[in-house]
Amino acid sequence: MKTKIFCGWFLACGLFLSGCGIQSIPQAGNAVEAAFAEVTNQYKRRADLVPNLVNTVKGFAKQEEKVLTQVTEARAKATSITLDPKNLKSEDLAKFQSAQGELSQALGRLLVVSENYPQLKSDANFRDLQAQLEGTENRITVARNRYIDAIKEFNNLVTVPPYSWTNSLFYHFDKKPQFALEGAEATEVQKAPEVKF
């Protein structure tokens, strides 16, 4: 009789735990890592395009050396920061975001400078690079949105009962930090876009 009670209790515990995130939490953690890998992949794609864009503009805009130097330095800073998605801290993510924001601003200045050179705007290589860069920025946005969703799902699993109970008993995962706009990037978002004809 005791064996049947023990087996029944053991089976009930197994069923309870299987419905409380014993697999969901690690799967959500893997999804976060995969989503973050896609974000960094898209940032790398952008960083790889920058030297081509700078070299194309250099040929036309010799006197704009300061802007070109800023873009090159921002790219170097952005690519020097690496993050480990398993041990992601808010401070590290903020540094990464800040460096990527500086590169975004430098690229924006570069594209504004290019507007002063009609022969550059008509250059097919420049137009192709600009289109690729715009496409990359869109891909970064999509990848960041997917990462934000994966973080939300993971954070819900580790903080909302009954899954949080499984987390506290077996895993002890902490909430993961989210992407947030900071510094100059946040200021740029708050400004209304200027449209000129």
Image (cartoon, grey):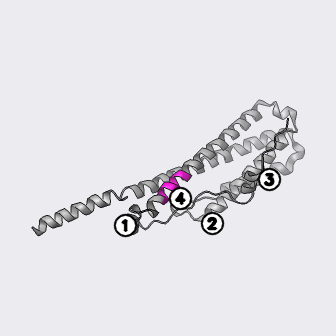
Left or right: 185 as drawn, with respect to 173:
right
The amino acid at mark 2 is: Glu
Q: Earlier in the sequence, mark 2 or mark 1?
A: 2
Residue 53 spot, x, y in % from top left: 75, 41
Figure quadrant of residue 9: bottom left
Magenta-drawn segment:
148-155
Callout 3–callout 4 Cβ contact below 8 Å: no
The amino acid at mark 4 is: Pro
Q: Earlier in the sequence, mark 3 or mark 4?
A: 3
Residue that badge 1 annotates: 170
- Which is in the foreground here, disc 2 or disc 4? 2
Q: Residue at x 27, y 58 (%)?
A: 15
Q: Determine whether the residue tagged by mark 4 lies in a helix, strand or loop.
A: helix
Left or right: 179 as drawn, with respect to 17:
right
Q: Earlier in the sequence, mark 2 or mark 4?
A: 4
Residue that badge 2 annotates: 91
Q: Determine whether the residue tagged by mark 3 lies in a helix, strand or loop.
A: helix
Residue that badge 3 annotates: 70
The amino acid at mark 3 is: Gln
Residue that badge 4 annotates: 85
The amino acid at mark 1 is: Phe
Callout 4–callout 1 Cβ contact below 8 Å: no
Residue 31 spot, x, y in % from top left: 47, 52
Which one is nearer the viewer's eye here, 163 or 88? 163
